Amino acid sequence: MKKIIKYRLHIALAICIAFVFTSCDLEPQDKFRFNPETVPQYTFGEKTPWEWLKTNPNDEFSLMIQAVELSDLVEEYSNKTDKRTYFLIKDEGFTKFNGILKREFGSDTLELTEVDPVKLRKILMYHILPQYVDQGPDNLLTLDFNYSFPTLTKDLGNPNMTINRDWNYVMQLNQDPNLGTGSKLTTDVKLHNYIFSNGNSVAHLTEGYARVEPFED
């Protein structure tokens, strides 16, 4: 019995020694490194944001299309020469509980044809910046820092928008804790860097909207 135990111990020891020497031949594995992508997702050449919106991608922009038309902003979204950043709002950004219809016009059951087009124009113009801002380090150099940008709106309570990007390079609108008096709304960008108008404009897609103060009637 002792001989059997001793034999088994020798076998186990031999296996361990063989494992140690063979494992030394294995190449060391690289450590996992997170490398977020900040390159443009889609480039559309000379196509304008309006031309792209009119195709109603994934059937998610019916209300945005209607809002642009009702606000008489087709020309602005068709701009091919000026530097622009557009935040394009999906339908749920209008209809959900914290959406535009409920927050700005009082009811999420309203039709866009029932709301004030002048106020609607102010909301959309707030989501346009008169400069090119993508998610890359040329514009948002420091992570988790709130950069302030002017908007195109004439609404006195909403002259600026702040933008930061988190560790995953997601752009966040109006996260600055010093912004506004408690009525601000924040939203994250869901899809970034849609390049239009021969590189003069960039669009980002959101499922909500942002503001500093409630928009003026």
Image (cartoon, rainbow, N blue to C red):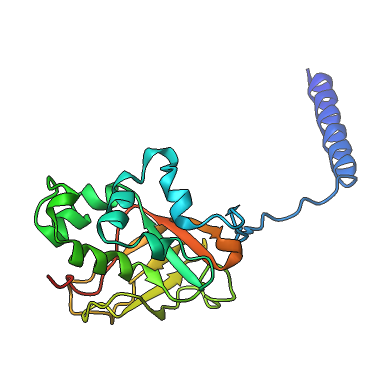
Residue 80 lies, in percent from the top left, at 52, 65
Residue 205, position in %: x, y? 42, 55
Answer left or right for 201 relative to 187. Answer: right
Comparing 3 with 46, the one in front is 46
Q: In the rendered image of this protein, does residue 3 appear above or below residue 165?
A: above
Residue at left offset 78%, top offset 23%: 5
Q: Position of residue 60 (x, y in %)?
A: 36, 43
Q: Is residue 25 left or right of residue 141?
A: right
Image quadrant occupied by the N terminus: top right
Q: How many marks?
A: 0
The residue at 86%/45% (across/down) is 26
177 sits left or right of 168 in the view: left
Left or right: 52, with 206 as reference point = right
Image spot of residue 203 (x, y percent) = 47, 60
Name the foreground residue: 3 vs 31: 31
**Can the viewer see residue 11 in this picture?**
yes
